[in-house]
């Protein structure tokens, strides 16, 4: 069982930056990818970014060029650097560890990001 704990959310003005962290309770082996998702009330959870064990990354079109996902293996932590934030980035952000076969899949409890002037 893997426990994931997100932190770093908060209130930021449009154009501002935030960095989210996701700390894993154990080493995430190479069979897992690490992902960030986000969700607003009444909508489905939306995939945001992925980082594979080899370091390759990919992003949703809506955040490409503004968000950067990275990982620190020594700290079992994944980060999401968010720049040039927009009001539409407001959501609860969730960290996810997913086996390359699809299951198992582990989720954190989420952290609220609010972009508002």
Image (cartoon, rainbow, N blue to C red):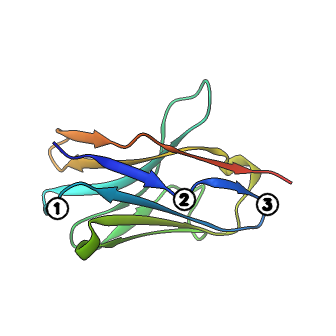
Disc 3 crowd, CA 10 A, few/some/many (<14, 14-19, 20+): some
- Tell me how far mark 2 sits from mark 3, CA to CA: 17 Å
The residue tagged 2 is 8
* Percent of width and height locating residue 27: 16, 62
* Percent of width and height locating residue 85: 70, 61
Q: Horizontally, is 116 left or right of 45 in the view?
A: right
Which of the labelled discs sits on residue 107, or is there none? none
Number of callouts in the render?
3
Do the numbered discs 2 and 1 sit on residues whose CB atoms are within 8 Å? Answer: no
* Percent of width and height locating residue 81: 53, 69
Instruction: Look at the numbered disc 2 and give the secondary structure of its residue.
Output: loop
Q: Residue at coordinates 67% horizontally, 46% vertically from top-left?
A: 90
Name the residue furthest right: 117
Q: Earlier in the sequence, mark 2 or mark 3?
A: 2
Q: Earlier in the sequence, mark 2 or mark 1?
A: 2
Q: Residue at coordinates 79% horizontally, 60% vertically from top-left?
A: 14
Q: Horizontally, is 97 left or right of 26 in the view?
A: right
Q: Quadrant of the C terminus?
A: bottom right
Q: Nearer the viewer, mark 2 or mark 3?
A: 2
Q: Horizontally, is 36 left or right of 4 in the view?
A: right
The residue tagged 3 is 14
The residue tagged 1 is 27
Q: Residue at coordinates 48% horizontally, 35% vertically from top-left?
A: 45
In the image, 10 versus 86, the foreground residue is: 10
* Percent of width and height locating residue 98: 24, 47
- Tell me how far mark 3 sits from mark 1, CA to CA: 35 Å
């Amino acid at each position: 069982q893997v426990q994931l704990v997100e932190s770093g959310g908060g209130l930021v003005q449009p154009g501002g930056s935030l960095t989210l962290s996701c700390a894993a309770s154990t080493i995430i082996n190479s069979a897992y990818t690490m992902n960030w998702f986000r969700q607003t009330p009444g909508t489905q959870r939306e995939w945001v970014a992925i980082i594979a064990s080899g370091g390759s990354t990919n992003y949703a079109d809506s955040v490409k060029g503004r968000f950067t996902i990275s990982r620190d293996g020594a700290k079992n932590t994944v980060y999401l650097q968010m720049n040039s934030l927009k009001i539409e980035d407001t959501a609860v952000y969730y960290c996810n560890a997913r086996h390359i076969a699809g299951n198992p899949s582990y989720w954190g409890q989420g952290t609220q990001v609010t972009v508002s002037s």
